[in-house]
Image (cartoon, rainbow, N blue to C red):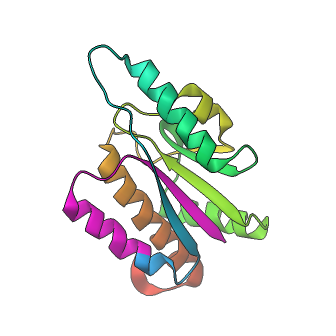
Amino acid sequence: MHIHLVFVGKTAFSDIESAIERYAKRLVHYCKLQIHYVKAEKISTGVGVQVVRDREGERILKVTGPDSHLIILDQRGRQLDSGGLSKFVEGLIFSAVSDVWIVVGGPVGLSAKVIESGRDVLSLSKMTFPHDLARLMLVEQLYRAFTILKGEPYNR
């Protein structure tokens, strides 16, 4: 399986970036992993939040392509615990999905068009997290999911 993570903009905190890299290096033992960064739109007084979402959304959909297996992270998505995420990943593997694209939006979230394009919409929590932290949580949870599938001790 090849997992593509799509992030809007660069991570603002070097500590979070190094933690993401740490889990990404661990993940490559289980799957091929690639992180794609989409240019973040400048947020300013003259540009509304919806315009920012739409512009970033166009960039996301251009990177992912129209026929990709797109999974969206959104606070209104379906919540899974770590075991549930591992079963979700296992289902993708058994369905022979070779390329999975997982999108984490920027500070203002994702456009409706991106969310509607997703085959699945998942949520990390009912709480709202900064997008930088959501990236780290996603990579760690993917790593945890694979260790659960392999019966490895990380999850215990």
Give the residues in magenta. 1-24
Residue at 63% in and 49% down: 64
Task: Looking at this view, name the residue that lies furthest to the top.
Answer: 46
Asked whether residue 104 appears in the rendered view, the answer is yes
Q: Horizontally, is 20 left or right of 104 in the view?
A: left
Residue at 46% in and 28% down: 53
Asked whether residue 156 appears in the rendered view, the answer is no
Residue closer to the observer: 39 or 98: 39
Residue 116 image point, x, y percent: 65, 32
Residue 59 image point, x, y percent: 54, 39
Residue at 79% in and 64% down: 95
User: Does 18 sit above or below residue 133?
Assistant: below
Residue 151 image point, x, y percent: 54, 84
Q: How many numbered discs?
A: 0
User: Does 71 sit above or below residue 26?
Assistant: above
Residue 87 figure quarter:
bottom right
Q: Horizontally, is 30 left or right of 144 in the view?
A: right
> What is the quadrant of the C terminus in the image?
bottom left
Q: Is residue 115 magenta?
A: no
Q: Is residue 20 magenta?
A: yes
> What is the quadrant of the N terminus in the image?
bottom right
User: Does 75 sit above or below residue 17?
Assistant: above
Residue 129 figure quarter:
top left
Residue 21 figure quarter:
bottom left
Residue closer to the observer: 13 or 87: 13
Residue at 29% in and 68% down: 19
Residue closer to the observer: 66 or 29: 66
